[in-house]
Image (tube, helix red, strand yellow):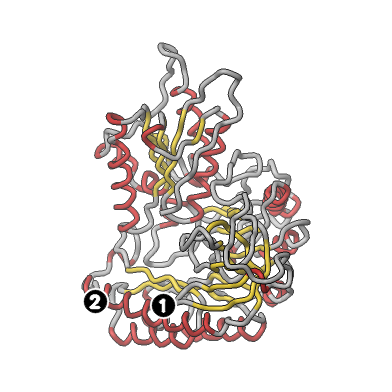
Amino acid sequence: MSPPLDGRPATSNAPGVVPRTIHFVSLGCPKNRVDTEVMLGVSDQAGYQLVGDPAEAQVIVVNTCGFIEAAKQESIDTILALSDLKQSGRCEKLVVSGCLSQRYPQVLATELPEVDHFLGSSDMLKLRPILKVADAPEGQHTRVGRILVGDPADYVFRLSDPRRLSLSPASAYVKIAEGCSRACSFCAIPSFRGVQRSRPIGDVVGEVERLVATGTVEINLISQDTVSYGRDLPTTAEDSPSSAPPSSGKGGRRQLVPLLQRLQTVAGLRWLRLFYLYPEKLDPALLDLLASGGPLVPYVDMPFQHASDAMLTRMRRGYRAERQREIVETLRARVPHVFIRTAFIVGHPGETDADFEALREFVGQGAFDHVGVFRYSHEDGTHSGGMQDLVPDDVVEARAEALLETQRAVSIRRLRNMVGRELEVLVEGQSEESEFLLSGRHRGQAPEIDGKVVLTNGTAKPGQLRHALVTDAGDYDLVADLSRGHDSPEGPAKKRLNVLP
């Protein structure tokens, strides 16, 4: 679950007018968070005040995840818990949006009478009429449908859409495409997010320029299949105006490198990060950009999903384990100090002990910086969902724990090798460890999902990029001394650290 969205007064209300209040819960992945931020922008335009306490909200919006069973259950539990506020709080309207309602609109409408409106995974702008009705004076309400779930293929985020960041203003996610055209056997995303729809290069660049102009120094590019960005666009998409509608043209040419080349020229952009590169043959031009020392940081997020040829075939991944090894070797050889994040699924139907041992060996030898481990979820509408040779739950859990323990040993070893190095760190604010410490991230740590750098001995403002010397390492986090970075204004090390406002 993503961090809560904090409240602040709306700015679009007339003097003396008490704004209506709204609360958002954003579940699931960063792509969902961007969708939530679009709805937050819609509520800003409608004059609503965002509140952190759902009991104080007149409208509550839950943006759900419907990817796997655990995420679906979390979404349902959250909806039910918040629905109680229609009796005990101020809630007048409960709105459910996102992937879960896109997948099961009729079922949810029947099983959850407490919910007033359902929006799908691409219906963020439909929050406008809901808020307009909620804000209408007594007796002037017009009717808005309860199920407003549309075709996901009708929408791609555009620069002209409203959006307000909900995390640190120094860091932002930017979606470069919607949907996915892959056919992985375990994944239901194409069935409810639609096929891939890429934004024109000019539209993406325009959003990044706008974000950087308002103080953002780190941009994280996300989509479901980033390496395929632009394959669905016409070859002239680079010059498409930001107001142009999503294209249905078939350009067939990947445009990720041209996009990155444009973004690297945005003045003031310090860190540019790529998420979710499908394990294809790496473009030499992309490797050159990753190794260039420019804003594109040497960080590669590439979910391999497994390391057994038999399982990769069953998963319909379209490659064998040897390609994965070649990719890792190429990255290590071509990109100095590269950081690699990957993810794996354990317990897919048919996974044998030998398959799992091949996976564990790959993780132990791969020396990955960050690894996500997912327990297989049997999903309706997927090819794997029709398989019968399921792995027992207790075996799946044991394998997940064993793989995490393997990666923990790798992480400890790699982090300890960083002691004594000076790192550039993006300061995020006060550490959870102590009010006298700061927390930040270095280039090899993505927001929310990777480890942290605990900063000692110095002062810094959230959003600053500072240099610090690594003095200690834990299982997943580092400790670094701000006073020993080459840009420290503090002079001798101090025992206390105060967060500047």
| Proximity of marks 2 and 1: CB atoms separated by less than 8 Å | no
How far apart marks 2 and 1 lie (CA) works out to 16 Å
Which numbered disc covers residue 160? Answer: none
Task: Specify few, some or many for label 1: CA neighbours under 10 Å numbering under 14, 14-19, or 20 or more.
Answer: many
Q: Residue at x 60, y 53 (%)?
A: 172
In which quadrant of the rendered view does residue 150 lie?
A: top left
Question: In this rendering, which labeled residue sits more in front, label 2 or label 1?
Answer: 2
Residue 47: x, y in percent? 55, 27
Query: Any mark on residue 395, and which?
Result: 2
- Residue at image position (69%, 50%) is 215
Task: Find the residue positioned furthest to the top.
Answer: 139
Q: Earlier in the sequence, mark 2 or mark 1?
A: 1
> Residue 25: percent from the left, percent from the top?
42, 44
Q: Is mark 2 on a helix, strand or loop?
A: helix
Q: Is mark 1 on a helix, strand or loop?
A: loop
**Residue shown at 33% from the left, 68% from the top:** 375
Q: Where is residue 207 in the image (x, y as percent from the top left)?
A: 68, 48
Residue name at image x 50 percent, y 86 percent: 322
Residue 83 visible in this rendered orientation of the protein: yes
Q: Which of the pair 228/129 is nearer the observer?
A: 129
Above or below — where is 432 with respect to 336?
above
> Identity of the amino acid at label 2?
Val
**Residue 255 visible at all:** no
Q: Label 1 amino acid?
A: His
Residue position marked by numbered label 1 in the rendering: 306
Residues 237 and 215: in front is: 215
How many circles with numbers are drawn on the protein?
Answer: 2
